[in-house]
Amino acid sequence: MSCVDELNLFKVIANAGGIKIDDWELLSPNEEWSYLRSFSKLVGRICDISKADENITSNLSMKDLTSDELSLSLQVLWGIIYHDSIAEIIPGFVFHEADHGVDNRFCPIIARLPIAYNIQGIRFIVWIEGNFDFVHNREDYIIGVVPRSKSNHHIQLDSSIDCEPNSPEIWIVPEWPVFKLLPLIEKKTVSIVKKTPYSLEVLHNLESD
C-alpha cells in the first residue's frame, strides 16, 4: 500500500461516525478518533515531504511513526519546506544564555542556514535561504541568530554527515556548538561540540546598505 493509499484509508476511518454491522456498533467514536485524525494529518504531511524529495522518506514505514521524536522531526521538516514564516518554527537563540540582555544589537542579514537531518538513515541538509538577524553583544561579538523569514529552501542529500537519527541539528559556524532543533522549539537549549562540514553562509549584510 502506498503512502497516498494509506492516507486515504485513514481519512475515511477518521471521518467516520462509527463502524456498525447490522446495527450493532462495532467501533464507536471516542478519544482514539482524535489521535487517528492527527495520525492521518501526519501521513499527509509525509506525502507532502515526499513530493519535495522522495529520497528523504524512502526508509520510512508506518510503524516508525510511533516514535514521538520522529513524528515531531517530520512535522518540523514539513513546516520548514512549506512555510515562509520560519520564525514560527525555528526560534532565535544565543550561544550563552547569560548573553541575553538589553544591550544586545540585531544586525539584519540575508543568509543560508543549514539544518542537518537523519530520517531513518537518510542523511541530508535542508538549506534555508532568507532573512535572519545576527545578535551582537555590547562588545560587538556575534552571539546568536534569529530567523525571520524564508525566501527559498534546498534539500541536499549527503550520506557522510554526522547527525543523530530523528534529531535535527542547526549548524551555524564551526567555532560554535551544534544546536539541537527540537529542544529549541520547547525553549530549551541543548548543544554539542563537533566539527561540521557546512555552516551558515551570509549572502548579504543589510546593515551596510
Image: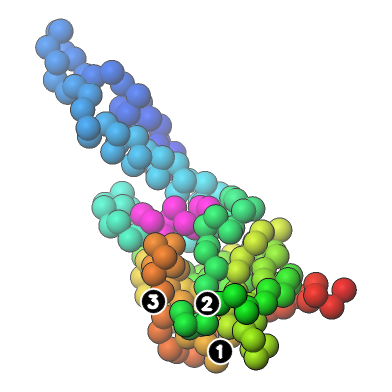
Q: Quadrant of the C terminus?
A: bottom right
Is residue 124 located in the magenta-colored stretch of the structure?
no
Q: Magenta stretch?
A: 71-79
Q: Position of residue 46 (x, y in %)?
A: 45, 49
Say whether residue 11 is visible.
yes
Say whether residue 182 is visible.
no
The residue pinned by badge 1 equals 174
Judged left or right of residue 103, residue 107 is: right
| Residue in view at x 70 percent, y 65 percent | 131
Please tell me the numbered disc located at residue 106. none
Tally of numbered discs: 3
Disc 2 residue type (three-letter): His
Above/below status of 7 relative to 104: above
Please tell me the numbered disc located at residue 190. 3
Q: Earlier in the sequence, mark 1 or mark 3?
A: 1
Q: Position of residue 22 (x, y in %)?
A: 14, 8
Q: Quadrant of the N terminus?
A: top left
| Label 2 secondary element | loop
Q: Residue furthest front?
A: 102
Q: Position of residue 69 (x, y in %)?
A: 33, 61
Which is more foreground, mark 1 or mark 3?
3
